[in-house]
Amino acid sequence: MAERIAIVGVGQTEFKSRRPDISQVELVNGAVRAALDNAQLTIKDIDTVVIGNMELFEGNYQVDMWMTEGSGAYLKSGFKVQSGGTTGSTVSTTCFNLAASGEFNAVLGIGFEKQDEGSSQASLRSIYEDVFYDVGGGGKSAGTAVQGIALDMLGRKSITEEQVAIVRVKQAENAIRNPHAHLRKRLTVEEVMNSPLLAWPVRRLHLCPTSVGACAIIVAPESNATKISSNPAWVIDWVTVHGGMLPFIGVMTQAIPTTPLGPIWVWSFEQAATKIYKRNGITNPRQEVDVFEVYDMATWAEIEWYERLHLCEKNGGHKLVEARATWMNGDIPVNPSGGVTSTNAIGASAMQRIAEIAIQIRGNGGDRQVPNVKQAMAVTAGGDSYSAAVLMRKSL
Amino acid sequence: MSQKGAEEHLYVDQIVKLPFTESAGLYLSKFLTKIRDEGKIVANKCPKCHRVILPPRIVCGYCKVKIEDKPENWVELSDKGTVTDTMTIEDREIDAITGEMLGVPNPNLFIHLDGGDEWTIIGHISEEMDVSNVPPGTRVQAVWKPMEERVGKMSDIKYFRVIQE
């Protein structure tokens, strides 16, 4: 019988474009210390450490070993996990599994990225096995992958370009209230609609930035969680779904919408969310869940996720936008943190979705706090088609 | 690189070059050899769902079935096809095959090759630089390099050219 578990500590650094003042080890250490302070623990209370970042984004690997000075993993068990864009949520669900095993009293998870140190584009473009196949280079850049979703949504009239800009403005407003967000500048619909075109209809301001930052969580089984915190965020259920590696359809991300299953990241995202709904008796998520954090690698994706989370019917994204339902004061707030379009240190991004709903459950959101959160969900997605969904509650 | 100030913060160069050669394996070797020696594009077919898979794989990821290397599981595709999507990359990007920067604009076509099914998509370079002249539905054909210049890479096809039928 698995242990019931809770998040008892959350730590985040500040997020910026460049941090010439600190090393990767020091960056990670900032998040670890913040999480330990939040839980009022010391590193001696941690039994195992799981860490993750994007392969080769900083030009190195085996961060589970050489990051030990910053992570506190020296002489403890633990390892690195990675799953591309969802690395942070895979670190988190791994921590949940370890805590639920009953073998550990406290598990520390860390996600980070220091994107000012190298060419993330070079790494992204060599990630897949079938590099040789993409001779034109059109198959696997994140922006063009988003283009597939965007064209599909415009084509089936789920959303207009102007409504996408309105949602981007909402994200900016939310980010201003979050001290850990990277882009904290007020935007106007005109600024978004006139930002440079990357691959029509995707514009620069629709896409997430490249950020430097780290996030850490501390997870404990029930017996210890209630000792550590009087206000733990109970992790009720979690699932990871793999949508299938892209080479099955020839690495041609651009061409995914034309396959019989629809866009593959979209598919795994919906599978993850609906598995959680089904297992926990959630039949009307818009009413039953108080707040969502989702991995909006682009504004287009956020609105696609509204549909895939079943917050509206298929092609109904525009209705949620017209009603401002997903705004901070709407009936189903999505990404009160400002989301990934505001902050994207990739290895941290998917963990921040989970950390932010733990913050919401615990009532520690400050200016970005949604009132009276009892049940919240985080759902993540990445270009390599992993998705994770996590359900948290204020009480067991 | 440094930032001047009361305290100086330095970046340390770490130049990483990754000149790997990966074994193509049985299935991709057949695929690339056919391209080099015969100017033909071959795919394989899942024995369970009958999906045509390009480039050919040892397993159908959806059915989790091994695709045996038997003649009935191989499919020869035409080098003609129908455009399903186009894309022009406006920003300069790294060519993961050579490590060099790709030129811009860089017009890409995504093509359903004749003889395949809706899964069978090849992505390649467009001869026509303005892809708005190559809308979905346009018929195109591969333009091959001369036999003596072919080396068993996707670039043995120079680009795809619009054809009239």
Image (cartoon, coloured by chain):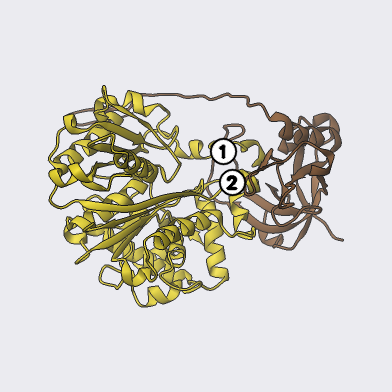
Chain colours: A yellow, B brown
Quadrant (top left/top right/bottom left/bottom right) for the C terminus of chain B:
bottom right
- Among the 4 quarters of the image, the one containing residue B11: top left
Quadrant (top left/top right/bottom left/bottom right) for the N terminus of chain B:
top left
Instruction: Indicate the amino acid at tag 1.
Output: Tyr
User: In terms of depth relative to the viewer, which is nearer, A39 or A100?
Assistant: A100
Residue name at image x 57 percent, y 32 percent = B99
Instruction: Please give the residue where the numbered disc 1 appears in the rendered image.
Output: A128
Left or right: B113 as drawn, with respect to A241? right
User: Which element type, helix, strand or loop, lies under badge 2?
Assistant: helix
- As displayed, is residue A386 above or below residue A313? above
Instruction: Indicate the amino acid at tag 2.
Output: Leu
Spatial CA distance of label 2 from label 1 is 8 Å
Q: Residue B53: x and y, percent?
A: 71, 47
Q: Residue A348: x and y, percent?
A: 34, 43
Instruction: Please give the residue where the numbered disc 2 appears in the rendered image.
Output: A246
Left or right: A53 as drawn, with respect to B45? left
Residue A322 shows up from this direction? yes
Left or right: B86 as drawn, with respect to A231? right
Q: Chain of mark 1?
A: A
User: Does the CB distance between marks 2 and 1 fall below 8 Å?
Assistant: yes
Q: Residue A314: x and y, percent?
A: 50, 71
Residue name at image x 72 percent, y 52 percent = B51
User: In terms of depth relative to the viewer, which is nearer, B95 or B152?
Assistant: B152
- As displayed, is residue A266 above or below residue B46? below
Residue A185 shows up from this direction? no
Q: Chain of mark 2?
A: A
- As displayed, is residue A122 above or below residue A2? above
Q: Residues within 10 Å of mark 1 (few under 14, many from 20)?
A: some
- Among the 4 quarters of the image, the one containing residue A285: bottom left
